[in-house]
Amino acid sequence: MATALAGCASREGQPSIDGESPERIEPVAAGVTFHLDVVSRNREMARHLERHLELQRFADFPDLQPAELRRLLGAAEDNARDLLAAQGYFDPVIALSMQEPAKAGEPRRIVMNVDPGAKARVEHVAIDFTGAVADDAEGEEQREVIQRDWLLKPGEAFTQEAWEGSRSDGLRVLQRERYPTARIADSFAVVNADTAEARLFVTYDSGPLYRFGALVMQGLERYDADGIRNIARIPSGEEYSEKKLLDAQQRLVASGYFESAFLMLDTSGEDPLDAPVIAQFREAREQKVVLGVGYSTDSKERLSIDHTHNRMWPLRWRAVNHVDLGTNAQSLTTQWTDMPASSGWAWYTGLELERGVYGDYRANSISLTGGRMRLVDSTERRFFLRYDASNARGESAPPASSSIIGNYNWTGRYFDDDLNPARGHGYGLESGVGFTLTPRRDPFLRVVLRGLQLFPFGGRNAAGKRNRIALRTELGAIHARDDVDIPVRLLFLTGGDNTVRGYTYQSIGNQLDDGTIYGARYMAWGSIEWQRPVTLFGDARSFEHAVFVDAGAAADEPDEARLNTGVGTGLRWASPVGPLQLDAAYGLRTHKWRLHLRVGFQF
C-alpha cells in the first residue's frame, strides 16, 4: 500500500499558538519528573494527544535520564503531527515549552500549544476492480455494495481509522462470497494540507471465482465418514460462501461428535472451481457424564445427570440420557439418533418417564416416540409416532388413559444469536392425529402454534445495544368428543416462568366440577415485554431492564376460559450460557406477587 500525505512535513520557525516564540528547552538533571499539558481550542484533540503522546508515558518515570528526555522532547512535535494526521489534521501549528518548578523537587511543566487547523474532508473517491469480479456479471452486486456502503464518501471528514475501515470493509464484501483470496492490490490517499482535501484511491484484486469441492477430513477415527459428510452438507459445486462454510462448521460442532471442528477452503490447488474443503477434527469422547444442580421457581431445587454415548450398542446410534430429580417433578429421558442420510433425514427414537404436577394433581406418565427428523439451516422438521400413558393421583382424579398419535412438527428459528438473541423471530407448528387406547378407543386431533418476535428500536448506547420489544404467543387445541379421556401429557396447562408470570407453574388450566385444576383442551397465552439496556457495575453491554404484561387462559370449552393477567418488571443478564432472567410479577386474578428465575433461551 502506498500512501501520499501532502503537507505532513514539519515546518520550522512556526510561531506558538499565541504568536510568541517557544522557550528554549534546557537540559535537566537526572531523576526529575515532569507534567505535560496540551493546550488547544480543540479540547477533543488536546485530550487525544495527552492520552497518546509518547512523552506522556514518561511523565512520572523517576529515573529519566537527561539524554532520554531531550530525545523525547525532540521527537514530541513529530509524534504530535502523526497523531493529528491520523485524525485528519494535516496542517497543525505546534509550539513546545518547558517551565521550571517553583520549588526544588517538584515536577517541571511541559506545555504543548496546538492549533490543529482545519480537518481534512474527502474530495474524491476512486474504487477500481481487477480479477474475476471486474468482468463477472454475478459479481456486479458485490461491486455495487462496495461502492454504496463505502464509509468515506465525498464530504465526509477524513481519519486514518475510517480510511482503513473503508478499505477493509470493501475487501470483506469480496472475501465473504465467491472470492476468498481477494486482496487490496493498491491504495493511497493524497491529502492537500493547504485546502484540507483528501483524494482516495483503492484497487481490489478479487482473484479467481471459487467453488466448493469435496470434503477432506483430518482427525476422524471413530465415526462413520459418510455420516459426518451428511452432517456437514458441504454444497460441492456451488460458489464459495463464507456463511455456508461456517454453517457447516457449526453443524459439526453442534452434532456432539467433536470437541472441535474447523473448516477451511483449500485455495492452494490449481483448480479454483473445485477447491477442497479441509475439515480438522478433534473427536469427543465416546461417553460423557455431566452432573448438575439447579434452581428455578417452576421446578424448585433439582439435581440432574446427563449421560451421552456417541455409539450406543447395539445400533451404534448417538444416545442422550437425562435424569432430572426436582422438588416438583422427576423424570428420566433417553433419545437415540442415527447419523443422517444424504437427504438430511435421520431416524430417532425416545423414551420419557415422568412424575410431575399437572394443575392440582400429581401424575405418572410414560411417552414413547419414534420417527424421522431433519435439521437444515434454521428449520427443523419431524415426523413421528408417539405413545402416551398417564395416571393421575389424588381424590376425584381423572381416570388413567393412553393414546397413540401420528405427528408432524415444524420449527423455524431465525435469530441473530442462538444463546442471547437481540433480533429475529421463531415460529413453531405441532400437529397430530391419533386415537385413545384406554379406557376406550376414540379419535382426536391436536394442534399447537407458537411464535416469538424480537423488534429492536431506538438509538444505541455506548456498547451498541438498543431497546427491544419481545412478543410471544402460544395457541393449543384438542378436538375430540366431550367424553374422551386424553392423556394429561397431551392436555394444556400454563402459568409460570416461561408463560404467564405472576402465577405458579401450570396453575392455569381447566376447572373441574369440584374446583380443582387439570389439563385443558384449549389454551392461549401471550406476552409483550419491553427490554432496555442498562449500565450496571460499569457494564453497558450485558444487562437489561424489562417491563412486561402476560395473559393466558385454558379450558375445555373456549367460552369457559377465564383470562389470567400478570404484570411485572425484571432484570436480564446475558450470561455465557444464555440470559439469566429475574422477574417480579403481580397476578391480577390472585392479587399476589411472585418471583420468577430462569436461565437460558429456548424456542
Image: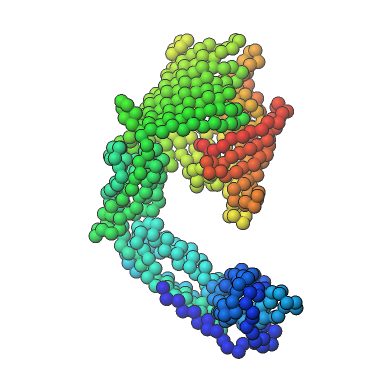
Can the viewer see residue 537? Answer: yes
Residue at the extreme right: 102
Task: Give the residue drawn at x 26%, y 54%.
Answer: 274
Query: Which quadrant is the N terminus positioned in?
Result: bottom left
Above or below, 58 against 556 in this view is: below
Residue 422 is situated, as x and y percent measured from the top left of the image, at: 55, 47
Which coloring applies here?
Answer: rainbow
Residue 515 is situated, as x and y percent measured from the top left of the image, at: 65, 15
Residue 157 is situated, as x and y percent measured from the top left of the image, at: 56, 72
Quarter of image, res 506: top right
Task: Give the residue drawn at x 34%, y 69%.
Answer: 130
> In front: 459, or 291?
291
> In front: 274, or 574?
574
Above or below, 436 against 244 in this view is: above
Residue at the extreme bottom: 13
Above or below, 561 against 412 in this view is: above
Quarter of image, res 228: top left
> In front: 442, or 384?
384
Task: Give the residue drawn at x 59%, y 17%.
Answer: 361
Can the viewer see residue 53? Answer: no
> In front: 331, or 457?
331
How many numbered marks does the figure carry?
0
Judge left or right: residue 46 versus residue 319: right
Task: Give the residue drawn at x 39%, y 68%.
Answer: 184
Quarter of image, res 346: top left
Judge left or right: residue 367 versus residue 179: right
Residue 513 is situated, as x and y percent measured from the top left of the image, at: 63, 13
Judge left or right: residue 212 versus residue 451: left
